[in-house]
Image: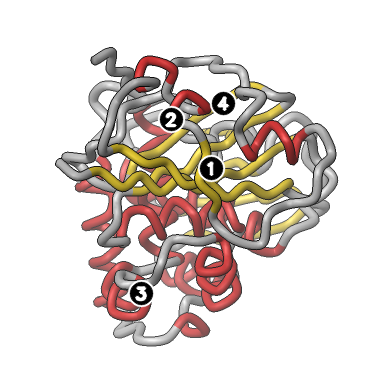
Amino acid sequence: MTMFSNDPLRADETRARRLADKIIREYAITRPEEIRLEDISMDRNVLVREGALSGSEAYLIRKGNKGIIRVRKDIPEAGRKRFAIAHELGHWEMHSEENQLKFCSEDDIGGYLGSPMEIEANAFASELLIPTRLVSKEFRSATPSLDAVKDLSSAYNVSLTAAAVKFIQISKEDCMAIFSRDGIVRWWRKGKEYSSIPGIEKHHPLHLESEACEVFRGRKESAKMVRVPNEAWFPWMREKRGFEVYEQSIRLGNYPTILTLLWVISES
């Protein structure tokens, strides 16, 4: 079986999640509405400001033990803006040895395809905004679907993309989140460390029989997970038995981007 890795080398996501969880415990946070990013940042000597930015979503300025996070004011989605702030706070907490001025693009923030530092900042942001200790009980046993992802997104005021990545991480099922743009897979994430799901080749074009391709081409999104051919996502798995792929895809706003949730059921 051909395997493909989507995880940059040296990224320590476990450490990032532990640091975020430490903050959740430090402030005794037990409900989503208590995750007040501006207050948390200020208490950690970081001032959050909104303003005009070109070519980046947010940046962090560090001077000694004080910092400023500037986030692009015209980011349309509140969840996406919150993730950008949490991402920069992750840099503040983990990467003090790096540049004193750190700009982060849209692909860096939530893109899951950047440098190890960006991957770590994303892992930190995900855990800070959607703490595993709070969501596991409610969502771990939920049947994989974009409805469950939307519920998670609404409950924690995060983007659908951030909610999808967290959902696959806590789900007891074998799932994958995939982000495509202009008909090409940009990145993917598997939920389980020892997942039976194979990876997806870099720059994989959307297969004509995938739901993602149908939605990208203008078809209405399916209301539930649907069975798709194995080869729609894993061409080398065409003849494999005991391996079923279910998919649900959605267009993100008015962008040429598709968020896909895969659920793979294997007899092995």
Q: Give the mark, 1 or 3, whose residue is nearer the N terminus.
A: 1
Residue at point 62%, 29% (across, down): 209
Taking depth in this image into account, of 231 and 26 the one nearest to the observer is 231
Residue named by callout 3: 135
Q: CA distance from mark 2 to mark 4?
A: 20 Å
- Residue at 47%, 44% (x, y): give it: 177
Q: CA distance from mark 1 to mark 3?
A: 20 Å
Q: Are marks 3 and 4 in contact (CB under 8 Å)?
A: no
Identify the mark nearer the N-term, 2 or 4.
4
Tag 3 near tag 2, CB within 8 Å:
no
Q: Report the front residue among 136 and 42.
A: 136
Q: Marks 1 and 2, Cα distance to the nearest angstrom?
A: 27 Å
Mark pair 4, 1: CA separation: 12 Å
In the image, what residue type sits under mark 4? Arg
Left or right: 103 in relation to 113: right
The chosen color scheme is secondary structure
Query: Where is residue 11 shown, x and y percent of the image?
Result: 28, 31
Amino acid type assigned to the residue bearing label 3 in the image: Val
Quadrant showing the N terminus: top left
Q: Earlier in the sequence, mark 4 or mark 1?
A: 1
Q: Which residue is mark 1?
A: 110
Disc 1 or 2, which lies upstream in sequence?
Answer: 1
The amino acid pointed to by label 1 is Gly
Q: Nearer the viewer, mark 4 or mark 1?
A: 4
Q: Nearer the viewer, mark 3 or mark 2?
A: 2
Q: Are marks 2 and 4 in contact (CB under 8 Å)?
A: no
**Residue that mark 2 sits on:** 230
Label 4: which secondary element: strand
